[in-house]
Image (spheres, helix red, strand yellow):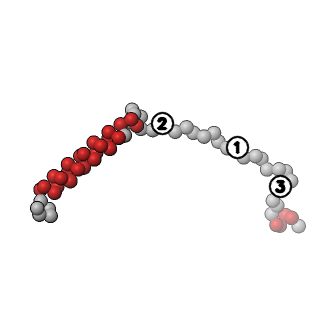
C-alpha cells in the first residue's frame, strides 16, 4: 500500500463518517429545536448618590 493510495483516503473517510455517527448518537438527547435559551438582560445597577460631605474642590478654589 502506497502512502497516498486511494485505500488510505477511503479508510480516513469511512473513519470520519463512523466517528460522526457515533458522536451524533451519543449527543442525540441534547438536541433540541432551539440552540440556546434566549439571553435574559440583567436589571441595571443603580449607584448610590454621593454624600454631600464628599466634595472634591479644585485646588485654586480651596485657598
Q: Secondary structure at mark 2?
A: loop
Q: Residue at x 16, y 57 (%)?
A: 8
Q: Earlier in the sequence, mark 2 or mark 1?
A: 2
Q: Earlier in the sequence, mark 2 or mark 3?
A: 2
Q: Secondary structure at mark 3?
A: loop
As drawn, the residue found furthest toward the top would be 33
Quarter of image, res 22: top left
Quarter of image, res 40: top right
Q: Which mark is residue 37?
A: 2
Q: Which mark is residue 46?
A: 1
Question: Which quadrant is the N terminus positioned in?
Answer: bottom left
Q: Is residue 19 left or right of residue 59?
A: left
Q: Which mark is residue 21?
A: none
Q: Earlier in the sequence, mark 1 or mark 3?
A: 1
Q: Which mark is residue 54?
A: 3
Q: Is residue 47 above or below residue 37?
A: below
Within 10 Å of the Cα at label 3, are there few (<14), some (14-19), or many (20+) other Cα atoms?
A: few
Front one among 36 and 14 = 14
Q: Residue at x 82, y 61 (%)?
A: 57
Camera-side mark, 2 or 3: 2
Q: Distance between the Cα atoms at labels 1 and 3?
A: 19 Å
Q: Residue at x 32, y 41 (%)?
A: 24
Camera-side mark, 2 or 1: 2
Q: Is residue 25 above or below residue 7?
A: above
Point out residue 32 in the picture as x, y percentages from the top left corner: 39, 34
Q: Distance between the Cα atoms at labels 2 and 1?
A: 27 Å
Q: Residue at x 32, y 44 (%)?
A: 23
Amino acid at each position: 500500500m502506497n502512502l497516498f493510495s486511494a485505500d488510505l483516503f477511503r479508510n480516513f473517510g469511512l473513519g470520519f463518517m463512523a466517528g460522526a455517527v457515533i458522536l451524533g448518537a451519543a449527543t442525540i438527547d441534547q438536541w433540541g429545536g432551539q440552540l440556546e435559551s434566549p439571553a435574559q438582560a440583567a436589571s441595571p445597577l443603580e449607584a448610590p448618590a454621593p454624600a454631600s460631605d464628599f466634595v472634591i474642590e479644585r485646588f485654586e478654589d480651596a485657598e
